[in-house]
Amino acid sequence: MTITKSMIHDALRTVAGPDGESNLTDLGMVSNVAIKDDRVYLSIDVPADKAARLEPLRRAAEEAVAGLDGVAAATAVLTAEAKEGRATNGSAATAPTEAAPSGIPGLPGVRHIIAVASGKGGVGKSTTAVNIALGLQALGLKVGMFDADIYGPSQPRLLGLSGEMPSATEDQQKLIPLKAYGLAVMSMGFLVDEAMPIVWRGPMVVQALNQMLFDVAWNHDGDLDVLVIDMPPGTGDVQLTMAQQVPLTGAVIVSTPQDLALIDARKGLNMFRKVDVPVLGLVENMSYFIAPDNGKRWDIFGHGGAEKEAEKLGLAFLGGIPLHMDIRALSDEGKPITASQPESKEAEIYRELAAKVWEAVQDSKGVEVPVMKVSQGRDSLRIAFKDGYSYDLPAEMLRVLSPSAEVQGHSAEQRVTVPGKRNVKIKELKPVGKYAAKIVFDDGHDTGLYSWSYLLELGKEKDARWQGYLEDLAAKGLGRG
Ligand code: ADP
């Protein structure tokens, strides 16, 4: 049977709206319906302040549509419409952990995931990301591109894929990434209208992105050596939660040479360091200007500033990319320069950049996987590292010093001192990729991603950390329960 939009709208009449009186369709909450073969995607507009509580509604909508004859699978995401155009960072986001799913294992069929991030929008992050991806491919690697820039997904346009839709695998379980210039590509832009301004709130973004990332058969054409993620710009809770939840090998930070952008880049760096994701290095975009008529180089912002800054921050400088007409013009045409003009100087610069990124990936060996065992009473974790260090970390300590966004906050002022966890128990360990584990506690907390290096640090500084926690408790008049 051919599925039509009106059949979907009818099905959504069976799902009560949040007012408890009418239904999703009649309330006009269903904004986007896309049908691809027997798979349906839809977005439901919800009031931003209620988003976190409406996860059951999202699921009910999915079930109602998936129940239709001829529909193999349905994906619904919650959105809130923008009042003031496009959001350029995650500052409007609400707390990220409210509705964030947990227990995400590594991506099957993907060896490395590299995030390309920027402290703010407009610095050329997406352009750099796609050209790095193509540069990695030029090194002989198999590469994917995941566009997570939900505020303005530009990869469909950059790769000439606007208006295309991914199809599903035979078993209908996954989406097959689209192909462009040899890259396996997936973007939220394939599912929602690029021109429609949407403000995605924290919990929705994380849920939608995770769903999308893990719903894709990245290895449809064979395993990927590397998946490049074009991150949402900025350093808000959305970015922090993504950095925390996706098993990243490392991150590349893109900045422009002006001071202001570098301050933003520093924020980006701190964000990744906070969640223990190795920062592979800094890229300076629009580093200098090449005049299109005579090819003369102009160092508009001076020379070497970003490199010095990177050094100060203890960060590798991966290189500078010129501001060049062709980079912009070819991007607009959906023909990234590294693929469409591989013999150009700019393509060579991107390839060199990609080679440095790949080198940094090879070098970023984290702490080796430790042996972990929860005690019989589930009140402590024994962790033994390969180099001979071993520690017993109490469940209470792990819980109250969880590296989750809700415990660590975004800044010192936002840090939460968690009281009353004297008797908390460890319910489950869930390894994530090759660098961390999630710990599920019996009070329901499960959003902390404990990297091996964080656990090693906790072990080494056990007494001092614990003392610091007790002092925080006392200062706030709280107790261990
Ligand atoms: P972001 O992802 O940071 O928002 P984009 O990659 O969309 O930024 O780039 C913003 C604009 O700048 C686009 O029009 C793009 O073509 C242009 N641009 C990016 N990098 C360069 C460059 N090195 N030279 C010329 N134009 C560039």
Image (cartoon, helix red, strand yellow):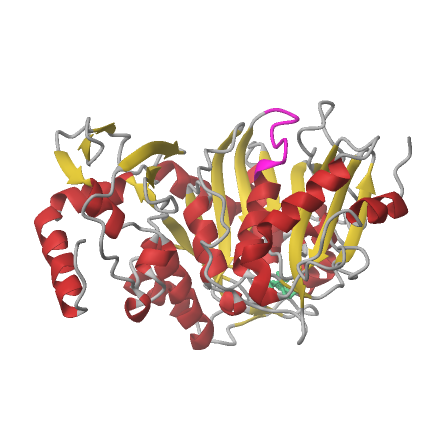
User: Which x, y percent locates residue 328?
Assistant: 68, 62
Q: For residue 394, which quarter of the picture? A: top left
Magenta-colored stretch includes residue 219: yes
Q: For residue 479, which quarter of the picture? A: bottom left
| 352 and 98: which is toward the camera | 98
| 266 and 299: which is toward the camera | 266
| 342 and 90: which is toward the camera | 90
User: Which x, y percent locates residue 104?
Assistant: 46, 37
Question: Is there any visible trace of residue 333 in the rendered image?
Answer: no
User: Which x, y percent locates residue 66?
Assistant: 74, 36
Q: What stretch is highlighted in magenta?
A: 214-222
Q: Quadrant of the N terminus?
A: top right
- Above or below residue 278? Residue 287 is below
Going 58% across and 70% down the picture, which residue do you hit? 289
| 318 and 415: which is toward the camera | 415
Q: Give the total number of marks visible in the rendering.
A: 0
Task: Tell me which image quadrant ligand 1 sits in.
Answer: bottom right
Characterize the magenta stretch by its predominant secondary structure. Answer: loop
Going 73% across and 60% down the picture, which residue do you hit? 21
Instruction: Report the residue that reaches farthest toward the front.
Output: 21
Q: For residue 381, which quarter of the picture? A: top left
Magenta-colored stretch includes residue 439: no
- Above or below residue 242? Residue 178 is above
Going 39% across and 66% down the picture, which residue do you hit? 267
User: Which x, y percent locates residue 445?
Assistant: 36, 46
Question: Is there any visible trace of residue 60 in the rendered image?
Answer: yes
